[in-house]
Amino acid sequence: MAKSPPLTSQTEDFPRWYQDVVAKAELAENGPVRGTMVIRPYGYAIWEAMQQEVDARIKAAGAQNAYFPMFIPMSYLEKESAHVEGFSPELAIVTHGGGKELEEPAVVRPTSETIINASFSKWVQSYRDLPLLINQWSNVVRWEMRPRVFLRTSEFLWQEGHTAHATQADAATYALRILTDVYQDFMVNVLAIPVLSGLKSPAESFPGAIRSLCCEAMMRDGKALQMATSHELGQNFSRMFDISYSDQDGKLVNVWQTSWGCSTRMVGGLIMAHGDDKGLVVPPKLAPTQVVIQIVRDGEGVTEAAEALKRNLTDDQIVGQIDVQKDDQRGTVEASKILIDNKTSVSFGRRSTDWEIKGIPIRVELGPRDVEEGVGILVRRDTSEKTPVPLQELPQKISATLQIQQQDMLAKASMRLEDHTSQTTTLEEATEQAQEGFARIPWKTLGVDGEASLAAKGVSVRCLLREDNTTPATLDEPNLIAVVGRAY
Amino acid sequence: MAKSPPLTSQTEDFPRWYQDVVAKAELAENGPVRGTMVIRPYGYAIWEAMQQEVDARIKAAGAQNAYFPMFIPMSYLEKESAHVEGFSPELAIVTHGGGKELEEPAVVRPTSETIINASFSKWVQSYRDLPLLINQWSNVVRWEMRPRVFLRTSEFLWQEGHTAHATQADAATYALRILTDVYQDFMVNVLAIPVLSGLKSPAESFPGAIRSLCCEAMMRDGKALQMATSHELGQNFSRMFDISYSDQDGKLVNVWQTSWGCSTRMVGGLIMAHGDDKGLVVPPKLAPTQVVIQIVRDGEGVTEAAEALKRNLTDDQIVGQIDVQKDDQRGTVEASKILIDNKTSVSFGRRSTDWEIKGIPIRVELGPRDVEEGVGILVRRDTSEKTPVPLQELPQKISATLQIQQQDMLAKASMRLEDHTSQTTTLEEATEQAQEGFARIPWKTLGVDGEASLAAKGVSVRCLLREDNTTPATLDEPNLIAVVGRAY
């Protein structure tokens, strides 16, 4: 059973380990057009779970989903030249449709900022129409020269929120609310990934924004991944697209806006934040499959025991049952999240390895001898801990373990973030520390010039925080701390 | 209050009525690139409700969601020339990406048949890999010369399922299962739209299929709308894309396939199957908002009464509460599906009209006098029936009414379908009856030649059924009935 490991180890070659996990866990593969990806069922189930959690939080924040066309007239993008400069080599252009050349080429949306704002200018008339809070789930295209599945692909899936508010203060409050109540809450409490929620430096901000907020996470190789952004756009777009409202005195005022997004990139973040040499490790709250009941080999009563366990796990009446999907702690594990693996024609070792690669939180090994002894072997994916548990205690034990595992994964990732973050006082020190993880350095020590010299060494300012790690309201706040590191 | 009606009447001009409803109910509007549409939040909420219901049924049928790239190499489409002939003037072509002309142009998917089959040929190796059941939710593009919001747009949203099976019988069973357990069940039991589930005639079949199944519905103007299709593809694509498995004897065999889909077109179907001169009528099981508690004007205790009613409606403890969203009849109406309209600065009449246009199943009118008398006026959208109901009885009454309304809408639509369907025996008779609705005529009387002569008069064979209205297995069955009509 001790064959050569199916994956490259993280220490040997982290990028290759990543590619191995993506392939062997059957998450995704390259599409035929360069830079595109096929998201396979297991990878898509993870993305669907992310969508569901993020979507519920977006709706709780009052935004409504809508859908805007994927094709944008070229002239729309020319309106916002400052913005388009950043995109133009990334654009995919449709020149032919209906069997002939188009009069005006259409751009495949790299983002829907322009087309959504064109609608906003029609929809917003009076202060009564505000705030206007819109979100869209869709595919977008930005041509990638150096694609990498989930992290940088020419086509990816995301949500983009666009809002219009009566005042700058309202917009600022909402941009921060989305950052903390939607993104940070989801990442910390569902993905079990601690994030730094801060301001982007001017150089790292979205060109169309007056302020960019972000959630930054640390991967297991010490590099940073930007997991989501939320921008205050000021009146930049509302002036460009003429989005104004008549206030209570009948005066015309341009709206104040925000935009915010997260994407399939988060799947890459999940892989790299929790994965180990055995593969993916999925936190229980996100896991499409939480428990695999793995039949070791056929034998008397084994199938019956497996089915009874599945039934008991999903039975409303079991005392102590905890649904890790629900915040209110009632209910049970969903039946669809429990799988019985009875493919005993494939070797037990091979199957175990496959479930490990896929990062299923809990495996329960169940063989004829176990059933005879009245136990199942509970195996935690995150710690590899193996515990024989009497069959009648398994449902409660599994529920409790899923909860503990969720907490432990966050605790472990938080400790890793802390261990690989250093306080530094000079540029040299920060550059050196950034090779291992993140370095904290006073923003006034670093400044715009320091940032430029870090960039030359492949190190960037990930975000600016207050000393107590809370999110600053503006770049003008005193004593800001820059967190610097290498990034994906 | 008796101003000119906000909508064109159906009898006056049905197409204009449709456009009026789409605009005034704030469902959608035209996008800037010809043929594209902006789906507004209310329209999108209806689509989301459809998606959720269809998706649950697809998963129950064992299929898994995945995502394939939107850009397809031109060469893929050339592989299936018979198929591409039908599409080529409809294709949108990307010629530029990454700031330069592409070596091979990419096609924006008109359907994902080719790119999914390219993956299938890698994923299917052994009989153990079958059946392979994949579904995708996405946008697709087919350039439209005569676009019409929801019914025919250059870009639309849909799901497309693609499956591979070991035998023809398995494929046939699955294509029919999707038609009945997914589409028909959803349309009848959620949309409250009766459908004819039959076989397409050879002329109306998908060129790549050996048999095409469909669900056809009748709109209120007597015309047909194809609501969904399910195809048996035989081995047409598996030979083209080399999708084969080694059977238990190690022999290589091409798989047998199906594909099936439904789209945002169903929103158009919903509008035209149930809508009336006051606007949209949404069946309770689908409705994003099931109940509007409409405050007539401010007054003592009115807001409190409205909030108490909303609380009571969503309270788990209320006896007799029925959740029309759940099949098990337990639980309550979801809080997010109840809205309190307290915008008393806008006239009561104007607000009532707006809720009617949006087709909200139940309005509860609540004013100071009502509260004093301890009643609320329950107004059913489908019948316009107004009933004063004691406040404490309202929750039970509303729940019961939602259920009844769901049943009544289906009954009414079924009666309309029956009333507008005639038995005919000659081509002339069938042509004439098809002006008012559907005509049934023996397929052996009609035949391929009769079908062609109907086509010249704008009448087409919607589907072929057995005499008892069940779905035939093949076109070779004796005594098939052709249902003919005008169609969208």
Image (cartoon, coloured by chain):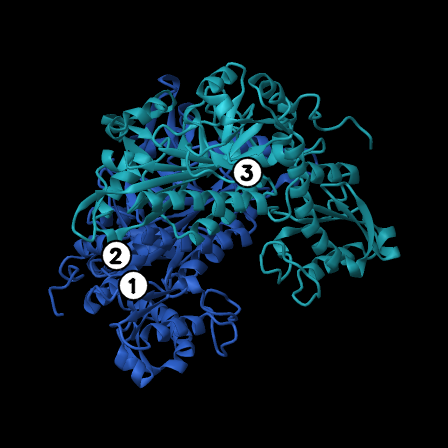
Chain colours: A cyan, B blue
Horizontal side, residue B252 vs residue B74: left or right = right
SS under mark 2? loop
Q: Which of label 3 and label 1 is nearer to you?
A: 3
Taking depth in this image into account, of B36 and A344 the one nearest to the observer is B36
Please state the chain letter of the residue tagged with numbered disc 2 in the rendered image. B
Residue at numbered disc 3: A469
* Residue at 49% over, 65% down: B326
Quickly name the residue at label 2: B25
**How dense is the environment of label 2, judged by Cα within 10 Å: few (below 14), some, or many (20 and up)?**
many
Q: Which tag, 2 or 1, sits closer to the chain's start?
A: 2
Q: Answer whether residue B205 is visible to the viewer in this image.
A: yes
The reply to whether discs 2 and 1 touch (Cβ–Cβ < 8 Å) is yes
Where in the figure is residue B427, as x and y percent of width and height?
24, 56
Q: CA distance from mark 2 to mark 1?
A: 8 Å
Q: Are marks 2 and 1 on the same chain?
A: yes
Examine the rendered structure and indicate whether residue A190 appears above or below residue B277.
Answer: above
Give the side of residue B331 with respect to residue B372, left or right: right
Q: Is residue A297 visible?
A: no
Q: Residue at x 85, y 57 (%)?
A: A374
The answer to whether dots 2 and 3 both sit on one chain is: no
> Residue at label 1?
B359
Binning the other alpha carbons within 10 Å of mark 3 as few (below 14), some (14 to 19) or many (20 upward) gives: few
In the displayed structure, A221 sits above or below B143; it is above
